Image (cartoon, rainbow, N blue to C red):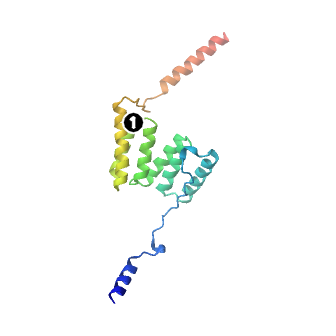
């Protein structure tokens, strides 16, 4: 009698497979173990599938995050930044969108911006694993800043230098024609 009660209470604890929550937006599986050894054709096809999935599910921040990561692997920096910014806009509380955006800035050596964005990701961390990832990246950013890694900022206007170069080319062209 008592064993039947234990069995029935254990059966109540088992969650049927159909009751497990399915992701709202399916993310295509990543077919590679070594991301540095991905054939260009496969990566392009994967990016195309992700772009189509983003069109099918325009409110999915995880899909946009995956698209940004895939574009970064394809050395498409601006496309990656756009996708990650879209993911952050769609879901401002998504840790991975924020973290990958910060990581991209870190890899581009914009350390000041990477530190700001990593601190935002640190505040969004929900698990100890996420907290550890963000802390390690923040620690690495600060170490590189201390060691004197050149920090690149994209906040300087290029109008005057571009005009100077154009003027120099015009003068050289005029001298050559004379």
Which element type, helix, strand or loop, lies under badge 1? helix
Q: Is residue 172 left or right of residue 85?
A: right
How many numbered marks are there? 1
115 or 161: nearer the viewer = 115
State the residue lying farthest toward the bottom.
Answer: 1
- For the point 52% across and 23% down, the residue is 163
17 or 65: nearer the viewer = 17
**Residue 77: image location, x then y, percent:** 52, 40
For the N terminus, the quadrant is bottom left
- For the point 34% across and 83% down, the residue is 6
91 or 128: nearer the viewer = 128
Q: Is residue 143 left or right of residue 33?
A: left
**Residue 159: image location, x then y, percent:** 49, 27
- For the point 40% across and 80% down, the residue is 11
157 or 92: nearer the viewer = 92
Dot 1: few (<14), some (14–19), or many (≥20) neighbours within 10 Å? many
For the C terminus, the quadrant is top right
146 vs 94: above or below: above
Q: Mark 1 — residue?
A: 111
State the residue lying farthest toward the top.
Answer: 178
153 vs 117: above or below: above
**Residue 72: image location, x then y, percent:** 52, 43
**Residue 27: image location, x then y, percent:** 52, 58
Q: Quadrant of residue 29?
A: bottom right
């Amino acid at each position: 009698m008592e064993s039947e009660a234990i069995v029935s209470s254990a059966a109540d604890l088992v969650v049927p497979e159909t009751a497990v929550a399915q992701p709202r937006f399916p993310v295509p599986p990543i077919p590679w173990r070594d991301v540095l050894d991905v054939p260009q054709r496969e990566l392009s096809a994967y990016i195309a599938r992700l772009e189509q999935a983003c069109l099918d599910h325009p409110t999915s921040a995880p899909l946009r995050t995956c698209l940004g990561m895939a574009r970064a692997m394809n050395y498409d920096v601006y496309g990656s930044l756009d996708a990650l910014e879209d993911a952050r806009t769609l879901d401002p509380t998504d840790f991975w969108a924020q973290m990958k955006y910060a990581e991209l800035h870190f890899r581009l050596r914009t350390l000041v911006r990477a530190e700001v964005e990593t601190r935002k990701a640190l505040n969004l961390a929900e698990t100890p694993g996420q907290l550890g990832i963000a802390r390690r990246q923040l620690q690495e950013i600060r170490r590189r800043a201390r060691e004197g890694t050149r920090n690149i900022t994209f906040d300087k206007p290029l109008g005057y230098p571009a005009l100077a170069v154009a003027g120099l080319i015009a003068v050289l062209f005029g001298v050559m024609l004379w």
